[in-house]
Image (cartoon, grey):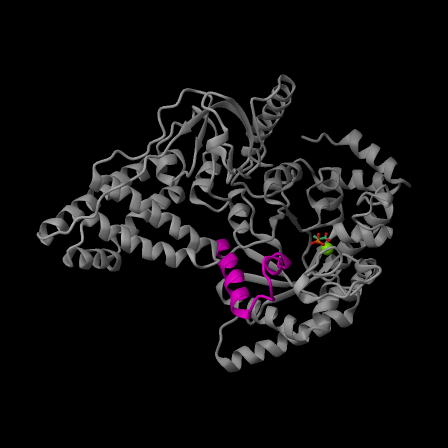
């Protein structure tokens, strides 16, 4: 079976199916409405008291932020408008159960009708609150995860935060559900409690048998029922490796990113959706170095409006508070298609009308995005980044558009960050060779090695026939990287890397030696990269880099680096 891996790690254990009871009641007509209202208020009080206890317990096992998920449930039921509406229905003769049900339903439908994940999550919270209060009114005990024996994989249709708050973390090795996703509160809690979890597994409750042995992979979302001995052995070994690595890396959580001789680096994350910013922070990223905005466009059937985009950018900024957020403008074309744009088929699409080229050719679409980013910049520490820059004109044109939009917003009295920084992706051969010229026009560089490797080696990043050439450790690519970093340092602008190579332990000493200032990596790589950086002094990194730059082939470089670097 397969679902969404929401909390990484391997869980191997025995399935325990937790069936939820149905909450049924027959609505009654009430005459003594005052007594019914006090029955409702008592139930609310008991709910708040029980929830507060659960929140306190969760504060100890998970932390303050997580406990707030449950305290949030108290705020929902204590909301004067919601309570007032329920009591109005009771005044009209409805019983407390029916009144609660119908008002909660109204909110659930309202919240579910948006495509905003956070608001949809509010609907799940209201559902959870309704269930809790109804159980008290009806005198049924809540669905509690039973005291499971050690080595249990909990299987439940829907997991609520209150259920997870009550579990004994030491005995639960995995969680399987039929609903939920990465941003569900219960998924966030599973991650904090470090319990591997796979959610939204179709027909899971009907397929898994209680007591059956189950393997779950919380990263890939794979679920194996009654595994064969060879699978069990493979996954047990993988679990051991991951556990060991995790323990080692946990020592780097909450620490600054510094080299062995005390130089500080920025260690940020690459994201594709605003909610990924939550993950970035959970994995201890120091902000976002690349927000690939094209994913927002891919989820739609037409170009998202300025307001839709503004809401998404603002959401990411609010999640990150004042931590840096570099928003890359639309990078479409190449291998990223958007059917509704009707992009022309090109013979060599990676060299065609892609990214900044497409945006400058379609100024209305570009203006909409830039206005949305500028408006969001009033809510956080946002920078703009242009992709696929090959020449100075592209930066100048893009910046001129930003200036025009700034004047427009000022005239409309709309807030934005007047000093917003504008940087570029250094990811083409031309950008590498003219980095000195581009640095004069940019506030920062971020090196995109995924494309830089392809364009330097003239080897398509997705073409397996030439994949033997596609390596960031090629002498040609390393020289490009070095000259981009040198040009940025000479002009005193920050220079980061957001291509996959930034997280490669073999590349890290070279980047330290060349003078990189920021590493932008996928969230799960943060602690690993922080550890790698901590192992190098500039002196040692320089020695390695000097040797590497004297070698002639990728193989020699790779062999040499493998011999001097121990990777975890
Ligand atoms: C890159 O090219 O290295 C990069 C980070 O951008 P993308 O992978 O989105 O092209
Ligand atoms: Mg790129």
Q: Residue at x 24, y 35 (%)?
A: 140
Q: Is residue 423 visible?
A: yes
Q: Position of residue 523 (x, y in %)?
A: 59, 44
Of 413 and 560, the residue lying toward us: 413
Q: Position of residue 59 (x, y in %)?
A: 36, 38
Left or right, residue 28 beside residue 345: left
Q: Is residue 244 above or below residue 96?
A: above
Left or right, residue 540 beside residue 211: right
Find out whether residue 377 is within the magenta segment: no
Of 148 and 480, the residue lying toward us: 148
Of 424 and 388, the residue lying toward us: 388
Image-quadrant location for residue 16: top left
Q: Residue at x 55, y 65 (%)?
A: 309
Count up the numbered dots: 0
Quadrant where the N terminus sits is top right
Image-quadrant location for residue 563: top right
Of 124 and 408, the residue lying toward us: 124
Q: Residue at x 23, y 59 (%)?
A: 85
Quadrant where the C terminus sits is top right
**Image: magenta residue range:** 293-321
């Amino acid at each position: 079976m397969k679902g969404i891996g929401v909390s990484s790690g391997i869980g191997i254990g025995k399935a325990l199916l937790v069936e939820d009871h149905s909450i049924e009641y027959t609505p009654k007509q009430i005459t003594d409405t005052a007594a019914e209202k006090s029955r409702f208020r008592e139930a609310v009080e008991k709910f708040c008291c029980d929830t507060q206890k659960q929140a306190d317990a969760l504060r100890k096992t998970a932390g303050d932020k997580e406990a707030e998920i449950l305290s949030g449930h108290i705020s929902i039921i204590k909301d004067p408008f919601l309570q007032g509406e329920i009591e109005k229905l009771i005044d009209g003769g409805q019983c407390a159960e029916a009144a609660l049900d119908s008002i909660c339903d109204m909110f659930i439908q309202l919240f579910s009708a948006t495509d905003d994940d956070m608001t949809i999550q509010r609907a799940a919270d209201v559902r959870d609150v309704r269930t809790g209060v109804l159980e008290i009114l009806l005198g049924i005990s809540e669905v509690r995860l039973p005291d499971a024996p050690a080595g249990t994989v909990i299987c439940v249709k829907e997991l609520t935060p209150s259920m997870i708050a009550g579990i004994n973390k030491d005995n639960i090795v995995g969680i399987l559900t039929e609903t939920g996703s990465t941003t569900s509160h219960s998924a966030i809690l599973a991650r904090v409690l470090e319990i591997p979890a796979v959610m939204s597994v179709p027909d899971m409750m009907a397929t898994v048998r209680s007591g059956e042995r189950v393997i779950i992979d919380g990263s890939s979302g794979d679920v194996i029922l009654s595994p064969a001995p060879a699978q069990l052995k493979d996954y047990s070994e993988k679990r051991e490796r991951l556990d060991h690595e995790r323990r080692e890396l946990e020592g780097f959580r909450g620490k600054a990113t510094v080299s062995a001789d005390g130089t500080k680096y920025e260690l940020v994350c690459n994201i594709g959706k605003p909610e990924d910013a939550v993950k970035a922070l959970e994995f201890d990223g120091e902000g976002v170095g690349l927000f690939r905005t094209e994913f927002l466009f891919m989820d739609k059937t037409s170009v998202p409006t300025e307001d839709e985009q503004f809401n998404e950018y603002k959401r990411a900024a609010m999640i990150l508070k004042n931590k840096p957020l570099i928003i890359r403008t639309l990078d479409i074309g190449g291998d990223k298609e958007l059917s509704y744009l009707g992009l022309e088929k090109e013979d060599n699409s990676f060299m065609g009308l892609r990214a900044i080229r497409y945006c400058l050719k379609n100024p209305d679409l570009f203006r909409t995005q830039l206005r949305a980013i500028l408006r969001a910049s009033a809510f956080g520490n946002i920078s703009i980044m242009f992709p696929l820059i090959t020449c100075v004109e592209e930066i100048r044109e893009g910046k001129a558009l930003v200036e025009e939009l700034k004047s427009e917003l000022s005239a409309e009295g709309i807030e934005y960050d007047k000093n917003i920084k504008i940087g570029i992706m250094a990811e083409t051969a031309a950008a590498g060779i003219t980095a000195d010229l581009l640095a004069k026009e940019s506030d920062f560089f971020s090196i995109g090695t995924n494309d830089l490797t392809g364009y330097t080696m003239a080897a398509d990043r997705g073409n397996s026939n030439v994949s033997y050439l596609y390596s960031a450790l090629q002498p040609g690519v390393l020289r490009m990287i070095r000259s981009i970093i040198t040009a940025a340092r000479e002009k005193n602008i920050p220079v980061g890397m957001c291509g996959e190579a930034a997280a490669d332990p073999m590349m890290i000493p070279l980047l330290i030696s060349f003078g990189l200032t920021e590493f932008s990596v996928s969230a799960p790589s943060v602690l690993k990269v922080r550890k790698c950086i901590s192992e190098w002094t500039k002196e040692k990194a320089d020695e390695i880099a000097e040797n590497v730059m004297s070698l002639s082939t990728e193989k020699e470089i790779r062999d040499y680096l493998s011999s001097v670097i121990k990777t975890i």
